[in-house]
Amino acid sequence: MNPITTKVRAGSELHCEVVDWLDTEAELLDDGHEARWLEEMVSREVIYQMPLRQTVERARGAGFEEHAFHLDETYGSLASRVARNQTLYAWAEDPPSRIRHFITGVRVSEAEDGLVAVRSNLLVMRTRQEMTQPQTFAGERRDVLRREDGVLRLYRRTILLDLTVIGTHNLAIFF
Amino acid sequence: MTTTEHRPGEQPVGLSADHLLRQLDEGLPAGEIPAALFGNEDVYRHELRSVFGRCWVFLAHESEIEARGDYVLRKIGEDNFVVVRDEEGGINVLFDACRHRGVQVCRADSGNTSHFRCPYHGWTYNTKGDLVGAPLWRNAFGGMSKEGNGLVPAAKVASYHGLVFATLDPSAPPLAEYLGGMTWYLDLVFGLNAEGVEVLGPPQRFVIDANWKSGADNFSGDDYHLGTLHRSVWEIGAFPVPFRENMLGYHIQASPGHSLSFSMAPTEDEPGPKFFGYPEELTKTFDTSRISAHQLDVARRSRVFVGNVFPNFSILALPMTEDGANHPPTGILTIRTWQPKGPGQVEVWNWFCAYKNMTPEQKDRAYKAGLGTFSMGGSFEMDDTEPWITVSRTGRSVAAEVLDFKLNYQMGMPGIGIAKRVEEWPGPGIVYWTRYEEGVQRNLFSFYSRMMQAAPGQWPDFTFDDE
Ligand code: FES
Ligand SMILES: [Fe+2]
């Protein structure tokens, strides 16, 4: 991402477009249309990562690892996950979880090269079978959107969870 | 007959550990295991003391704490221990509790330090655990000896191929004796060349509502579940050996408690993956500098290695890809622990490893392939945990108790299936050909039962009578 970025004010045209884009994405993911999400909203050159996090002393920062992840995906591996979920043997998500993405605090900046940087807060709630307490994932997304043939697509996504130990039995869902 | 445990002022809380262990001993020869072992609270309380409080447990890989002062915070049972390299390069395993009032002294998961200072009153310890000072020492403690007031170390610490283990029981035999026949098999994974293995980053940690024994049971050699639970991975091309082919190979009870399984073709010249699918440029460096020609040969023929060191340390090496359309499967190596967190909860710690002499590109490929398949977000492993959750639900059910519900571990017993005992085998242990066999898991549970019932200071045999 070009370091020279300009903050885009809430309410401006681009900001509205990004919020709209995030809502559309959340809707596709929550409704289980991950194949459409991948096809219509994700760049073929995407890098989609959830870094591993440790508790470290303040001097060492937030504890995110640069080279270790919970998820480290390309378009090919995301496509493989989507294809897997469509087989008859994807037990982890069949019956599917009920998922809700809550996206708030959307902050947008635009770079000179046309890339759009988006920071937002993320809350994902997941309920399965007869659970009454959802599994929750709170954190932050750092996205870069790129206009491809006039359409914004997900080009980079870093999911920074507020967790070092993850209280879920799998990460078969999309963030 | 049902005996129950009564505590003063309480209703009976279900079957006692004693009762269930007797049932286990009676049932094992017939391949039956009481389901309640996977959820009973009394059993769990005994496990913390009789298994995790006594056995050698895996804590870290030496490559995680390479420099002096490097430390990681780890668990023995449910308790925290600091694993730290001291100023002389030695590795210490220290109970994370200040000697003054028991306060936690290590508050980060990893780091580098010259000392640990307790946040409560400031007792300060060096990386050997020695007490080196406290504020206004002379006023407060002048005349008191620092010696004997250091952090309490584990009873014994030892490494094998860089794998750091510790035990809380001073009566424990040396690590190599405890590992017994398993050393031969650990050698042919971790000792394939002079450089050895390192970890790729800190471990992933996940908490799952399952019993820790489900992980140990699965990695002792549950190959049969691949055909159903993991069937999706063949449809997306993540794993190159078809289910039926992959059931060919050996099931090995390496020594009491420790089991493993190889996927291996019947003939030596089969065209499939060699050395767990690692690239040829790497496998050319595998030699007999640290292992025998027999061990090298077994590794060469192995498509998959999966095993469990009793109680809760598992190892898996096999060819995998996270993206079959763009990358052919390649060898991955994961090690993990199944940390107990209650009768119905386990914390999974998962590390990815690589041979140190792999190129950065090879390491990167192996890491991505491993992460995309054998982690909680991976196409293989994401399916494993939900079944384990329901095993523990069954295990703590009243129905399992009152219906005397037994789990079936009979595959491969005499007259059942096609597995046959093998006499010609270069390594130690009790060996079966074809992996349609659950003796590997019965071995886990039979040693488990002996550990659970061993008197303090007494240890079960580490060799089989009939080997
Ligand atoms: S409890 Fe650690 S110094 Fe007092
Ligand atoms: Fe599995």
Image (cartoon, coloured by chain):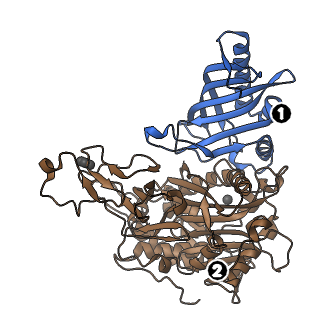
Chain colours: A blue, B brown
Q: Position of residue B438 (x, y in %)?
A: 64, 73
Task: State the residue position of label 1.
Answer: A39
Going by the numbered disc 2, the residue's amino acid type is Ile
Mark 1–mark 2 Cα distance, whole angstroms, equals 50 Å
Q: Secondary structure at mark 1?
A: helix
Q: Position of residue B57 (x, y in %)?
A: 47, 66
- Identify which residue is drawn at 44% across, 51% down: B112
- Identify which residue is drawn at 82% across, 62% down: B240
Ligand 2 is within 8 Å of the C-beta of the residue at disc 2: no
In the drawing, does residue B450 fall left or right of residue B237? left
Q: Secondary structure at mark 2?
A: loop
Going by the numbered disc 1, the residue's amino acid type is Glu
Q: Of discs 1 and 2, which sits in the foreground?
A: 2
Q: Position of residue A123 (x, y in %)?
A: 59, 30
Task: State the residue position of label 2.
Answer: B291
Mark 2: give few (<14), some (14-19) or many (20+) Cα within 10 Å: some
